[in-house]
Amino acid sequence: MKGLKIKLAHGKENPEEIFMSGSGDQYLHNLVNIMSTSGHEYQLLAVEILANLSPLSEKSGLKFARAAGPYLITLLSSPSNALKEASSVALGNLALSGYKVVKVLSHQDVINRLCFNLSGTPSDILNKNTAKNLTAEDSSCSKVESATLYALYHIIHSLECSKLANDGASSG
């Protein structure tokens, strides 16, 4: 698993090719199984691999969102800041796969669950993240909040782009 994570992170493996091969669904199933039943270290590794599998085509993204989305969203409530951060990044990357993928995630309550990881307004978070005297705990929390804002940005952007495209099509 660590080898796959490294290959994906360094761009040596094309995520779409994993899904196009016959073993893509099995990889996804195995990662979701590890993420849902294993200990913290293996969960984190599985989530990091899933984060590096995105963005995907809409077809592959839909498979991913349906299989892994509920588990990633559940991990947003984890006591582990590392799991919260990695899950947020994975969801943000997945949102890049398109409107239909974001729609599936929205039906899984992703926006509401992400908002639970914010401790103030976006400007409060940005000010806190740029402060020079952060403690280790503050830094860890700010990583979670930054990853959460990243995910929310991509999810909302996908929803807004679709709305703008629909508005443009209906007015023309």
Image: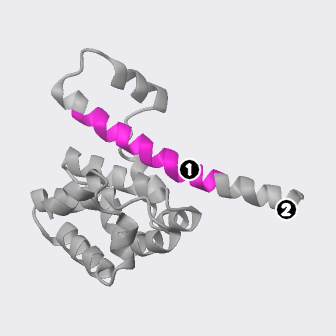
Q: Secondary structure at mark 1?
A: helix
Residue 113 at x, y percent in the picture? 40, 54
| Residue range of the region highlighted in magenta in the rendering | 140-160
Q: Residue furthest right?
A: 172
- Which numbered disc, 1 or 2, marks the residue that appears first in the sequence? 1
What secondary structure is the magenta-colored segment mainly?
helix
Q: Is residue 152 covered in magenta?
A: yes
Residue 83, numbered label: none
Residue 156, numbered label: 1
Q: Residue at x 47, y 72 (%)?
A: 62
Q: Secondary structure at mark 2?
A: helix
Q: Nearer the viewer, residue 20 or 98?
A: 20
Q: Say what amino acid the circle numbered 2 marks.
A: Ser
Q: Is residue 63 covered in magenta?
A: no
Q: Residue at x 43, y 41 (%)?
A: 149
Q: Say what amino acid the circle numbered 1 marks.
A: Ile
Q: Residue at x 48, y 57 (%)?
A: 95
148 horizontally vs 12: left or right: right
Residue 170, numbered label: 2
Q: Residue furthest bottom?
A: 22
Residue 61 at x, y percent in the picture? 45, 68
